Amino acid sequence: MAKETPQEKSTNQILIEQLMQNVGKISAIIEKEGQNIFGHKNLLSNNEINDYSLEFLELLTMLLHAGDKVDRRGAEYKALRQFFTNFSQQIQVRGGDMDEFVRYVHFLQRVFLENLEADKSVSFEKTREILMLLGVIFNDIILDVFHIYLEGKEKTIQAQQEELRLTSTPITEIWDGVLTLPIIGSLDSSRTMIVMEKLLQRIESDRARVVLIDVTGVMAIDSQVSHHLIQMIRATGLMGATAILTGIRPEIARALTSLNIDLSSVTTRSKLSEGLKEAFRQLHIEVSRPGK
C-alpha cells in the first residue's frame, strides 16, 4: 500500500502528526514563553505553566481528531474554550489582564506556524489551509473568551452600581422621631425606588414624624429629579410623616421655578441645620445650649 503524501493528507492530519513528532519541542517552547509572560509577575508558577501547556496540547489534539472542520458546538471545541476561559480567569484573579492572555494565545498560534514553515514537505496550498484552520481556532477562542470576560465585567459593574445605590443614601435618625435623608448625585427611577423603599421602612420602624430630605449634594435639578423628589415627599406624607426639603441653593431654586415645580405645600430650608430647627419646632422640642 502506497504511503500517503502530505498533499493527500488533511490539514488536521498534518497538524496532528506535527504535534506527535514535535510534542517535546513544542511543549518546551510554550512553557518557556509562558514563564516569560506570566512568571515575572508571579501570575503562574512554573508547574502551573507546564500543566497548562500539556493540557492545551492534549485538548487541541482532541479537537483536531474530531473532524476536518471546527464544530463550535462540539464537545471538543467547548472543552478547549472552557480551558482558555478558566486560564484567563486565573490570570485575572492574580492581578493579570486580558492583554497578557491574548499575547499568550497569539504566541501559541505562532509556534505552530513556525513549526509548519520548517516542514518543507508541506505544499503551499496545504500550508494556506492549515493557516486558515489555525486562524479559525485561535481567533474564535479569543473572541469567545473576550465575550465571556466582557459579560463578567458587565455583571460586576452592575453589582457594584447596585451596591452603590443601596449604600450611597444613608438614612439616619438624628433625633427621636427625626430622620435625615441626604441625596447625593442624581436620582433615576431605579435609585428612587430603592431609596423610597428604604425610607418608608425606616419611617415605619422608627415611627418617624419628620424627614429631612437634604439636596445639598445634588448638583443639578431637572424635570426627572424634581419629579422623583415630589414622589418621595408625597410618599412620606402618606406614611404620616412630614417632609422638609433642605439644601435649597439659589441655583436649585431657580431651576425649580423654571420647571414650574409647585413646592408651596412643602416646607423648604436653605440649610440642613435650619431644617432641623424647623423639625424641632413642629415637634415642640426645645433645645438649649449648655450653660443656658
Image (cartoon, rainbow, N blue to C red):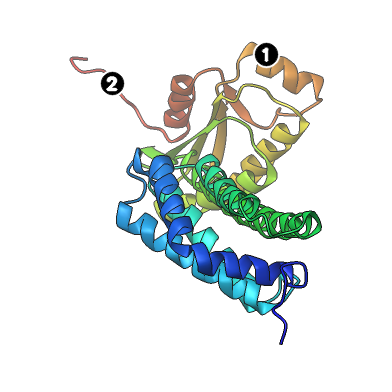
Q: Which of 250 and 187 is in front in this view?
A: 187
> In what quadrant of the picture does the C terminus appear?
top left
* Callout 1 crowding tier (Cα within 10 Å): few <14, some 14–19, many ≥20: few
Identify residue for label 2: 288
Front: mark 2 or 1: 1
Count of numbered marks? 2
State if disc 1 and disc 2 touch (CB < 8 Å).
no
Could you tell whether 291 is left or right of 156 in the image? Answer: left
Where, by quadrant of the figure, is residue 49 drawn? bottom left
Residue at 55%, 17% in the rendered image = 270
Distance in Å between CA atoms under marks 2 and 1: 33 Å
Identify residue for label 1: 251
Q: Which of 101 and 267 is in front in this view?
A: 101
Query: Which disc is residue 15 wearing?
Result: none
Q: Is residue 238 visible?
A: no
The numbered mark, 2 or 1, whose residue comes first in the sequence reads 1
Report x, y in % for residue 46: 31, 52
The amino acid type found where label 1 is placed reads: Glu
* Callout 2 crowding tier (Cα within 10 Å): few <14, some 14–19, many ≥20: few
Dot 1 falls on a residue whose secondary structure is helix
